Image (tube, rainbow, N blue to C red):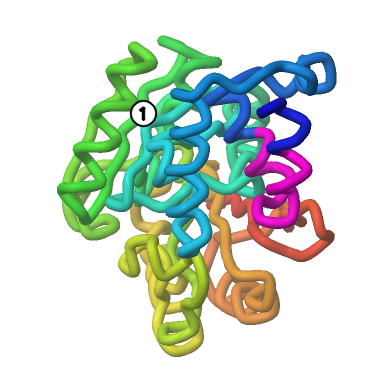
Amino acid sequence: MLLKEWIDKNKDIFNESDLRFLLKNVLVSPSSLLLARNKSIKLKELKKLSSVKKEYIKGRPLSYILKKEEFFGHEFFINSDVLVPRKETELLVEEALILIQDNNLKNVLDLGTGSANIAVSIKKLLGNKINIVSSDIDFKALKVASINRGKHSVDINFVNSDLFTSFKKRSFDLIVANPPYVETGNLSGPLLYEPRIALEGGRDGLDVVKRILFEAAKYLKRGGFLVSEFGYAHKDMCEEIISSIKNYKAVKWIKDYAGHFRGVVIKNG
């Protein structure tokens, strides 16, 4: 079978980005996809594609099937113990990098690290200019994070912690968080394959977001920053909370690629 025949047969099954990611990892890079459309698919490759397709049709995320995902230009090991890194979360990394470089920030906490995609991406670019501590409540997630630390040869310290409970005597220049913010009971489709602890945020989706907003003030240095993601419907509630906390100032509201508010940059003092 020719590659173009396989694509035509399966283009309605895989979304475009997943199709490109699949072919890149099984057959050919996306940049040469057009040139390779007349390529013959080997039997071994065809079996691999068929195996992936079988799992994908069930609704299982492609990242879990291939055990990898790309984030901020880097490849990460992924399994069902961690959230699949999202393109929108790259916006948090971009904001963090700007803050670190513009304000000469040194000590960073990556809260709820998961696969360590945020921490690794920042550390890869800035190296020894910064010190990063990454935490997660789930030991299984920290195992995945450790694999990615080794994969990218970066120096990151991992701590098992329920948000700030293990940092009572610590303070940071920057805290970055991508907390769970889906309303409990609202998971469907591929989300059902991802760890609930990394997705569900209570009845209104704000249980963990609220904890971070209220508690982070105790662990941020004067002049430090908090960068946090939240659900697209949560801006008004987050704005109300931020305005109630002494010394907090929302210096930027982050919009995702669809134009929805999905995060905030807060300065402490």
In front of the other: 51 or 235:
51
Check the image and report above or below for 239 versus 123: below
- At mark 1, the secondary structure is strand
Given residues 186 and 162, the one toward you in this image is 186
Percent across and percent down for residue 146 are 24, 29
Whether residue 172 is visible: yes
Check residue 194 for magenta coloring.
no
**Which region of the structure is painted magenta?**
7-20
Main secondary structure found in the magenta portion:
helix
- Residue for point 72% across, 47% down: 9
Residue at image location 66% in from the left, 56% down from the top: 13
Looking at the picture, does residue 220 appear above or below residue 185? above
Left or right of residue 151: residue 37: right
Tell me the kind of residue under disc 1.
Ile
In the rendered image, the vertical position of residue 19 relative to residue 156, given as above or below: below
User: Measured from the top left, where is residue 70 in percent x and y?
Assistant: 55, 32
Give whichever of 36, 220 is nearer the camera.
Answer: 36
Magenta-span inclusion, residue 12: yes
Query: Which image quadrant is residue 77 in?
Result: top left
Q: Is residue 214 visible?
A: no
Q: Is residue 6 left or right of residue 246?
A: right
Indicate whether 77 appears above or below 169.
above
* Quarter of the rendering containing residue 55: bottom left
Q: Alpha-carbon neighbours of circle 1 within 10 Å: few (<14), some, or many (≥20)? A: many
Which corner quadrant holds the N terminus?
Answer: top right
